[in-house]
Image (cartoon, rainbow, N blue to C red):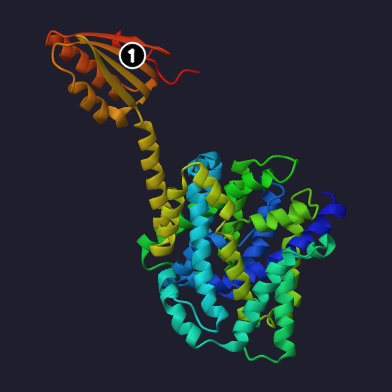
Amino acid sequence: MDLRRDLPASLVVFLVAVPLSLGIALASGAPVIAGLIGAVAGGIVTGLLAGSPLQVSGPAAGLTVVVFGLVQQLGWEVVCLATACAGGVQLLLGFLKVARGTLVIAPSVVHGMLAGIGISIALAQAHVLLGGSPASAPLANLMALPARLGALNLDATILGVLTIAVLIVWKKLPWPAVRAIPGPLVAVVAGTAVSLVAKMDVKRVDLPETLAFTQLKLPTEWGIFIVAVLTLAVIASIESLLCAVATDKLHSGPRSNLDKELTAQGAGNLVSGLLGGLPITGVIVRSSANIAAGGVSRWSAVFHGVWILLCVLFLGALIESIPLAVLAGLLVHVGINLVNLHHIRELTVHHEVRIYWATVAGVTCINLLAGVGLGVAVSVFYAIRRLSSVKVEKRQEGDLWKVAIRGTLTFACVPKLNFELSALPAGAAVDVDLDVDYIDHAAFESLHSWRLNHEKTGGKVRVEESQEEWYKPAAEGRPRLGRPA
């Protein structure tokens, strides 16, 4: 612990976390207090157990769409129980040390998921910004926008647009000392102050009169509940672990222990769910603010949770003065920023942008889980397609046919291989030049069967291997077990 550095950093993270936690609770269709409870659990519980010492956890935009849908289906009390159970699943995953295995999902799918979530949040909160209420689906929100524009609440719209303008301008100010003050805090304070001075009649944050925890309820639809638990556990785990990896890139201190971090996230979600809070993950906005402010240990995250708890206990009236339209403006800005143009350009260069857009389309047009599933399916399709990118060239020199096979021979390219080889005339002499870096059993069997059948017709086949030998050892009954080192 280094109080000289961790204490100031914790105050900065606290100022960033409070408005974001309130806004995410609003967007999730949960009680506003649930966002603050989740932030306290993420700060104190997860912070004390963290395997990623500089990562800060709390309610995150990545789960907003999921939680909103579950609240509509199951009710808030059941969602709290699902959050606690998801924490238990994360504890089990951490105990089984499978954290690195969850990172197998392609970055293009993860970035597409976040972009889809961002678009969904922006479309939903645009209605709140205009003084209305959002529908449950992104497409429904998009279709309803023209009607909402025709019946907007001018005061709410002014506050929401003012909040977005402050957030945009604040980043571009030429004074680093001024920019060090968190933009979300400035935007929320400015919007709230304008609403109070102008005596605007707008909806504001409504906290319970007494701090009472949500009474959990058992589900009536257990199938949906189990899917909800697994969905929350998987998405929260992936987002937290990716955030931990990203956080490691921002500092030169101790590296993250991902299995320990997954266990800490599970403990945080277990406590948050039992107390009536939102599900939590590692949050890159808070984590980067922590590092930029000079945090050097887990105690900056823990202290930020303590400050939020004190804020809930003693500054409730101040929080209740914040207009919902201001929080909506903050969330519209957050949602738009989740569509990262740098990532799109990078994925375009690496020919994976189609996976990205497939995931975005799935998340926004169906639901988050379907979007991730679609993205994974498309990424698997392209992986198989790459594995089948074998090149077969044939040319005739007198009575001799020369066949050059280049690439990687796997089961995926068997149809093409069979088509090309079966087109050779029966009884012809054939020289096969194998310039491949790998042959799996299916491809070997296809090639070897063709050779045996061709030789039975009176043809002659000679196989030469330009790189490592794969065909010859397999033909002799001692196949290689993997790619060459």
Left or right, 370 with respect to 176, comes to left
Residue 446, image x and y in percent? Answer: 24, 21
Question: Could you tell me the amino acid type at mark 1?
Answer: Asp
What residue do we see at 43% from left, 79% from top? Answer: 144
Q: Residues within 10 Å of mark 1 (few under 14, many from 20)?
A: some
Left or right, 68 with respect to 7, comes to left
From this viewpoint, is residue 214 visible? no
Based on the displayed image, in which of its 4 quarters is residue 314 positioned?
A: bottom right
Q: Nearer the viewer, residue 84 or 246?
A: 246
Based on the displayed image, in which of its 4 quarters is residue 417 positioned?
A: top left
**Name of the residue lying farthest toward the front:** 398
Which residue carries the number 1 mark? 433
Q: Is residue 460 above or below residue 89?
A: above
Q: Is residue 166 above or below residue 250?
A: below
Left or right, 371 with respect to 132, comes to left
Residue 393, image x and y in percent? Answer: 30, 22
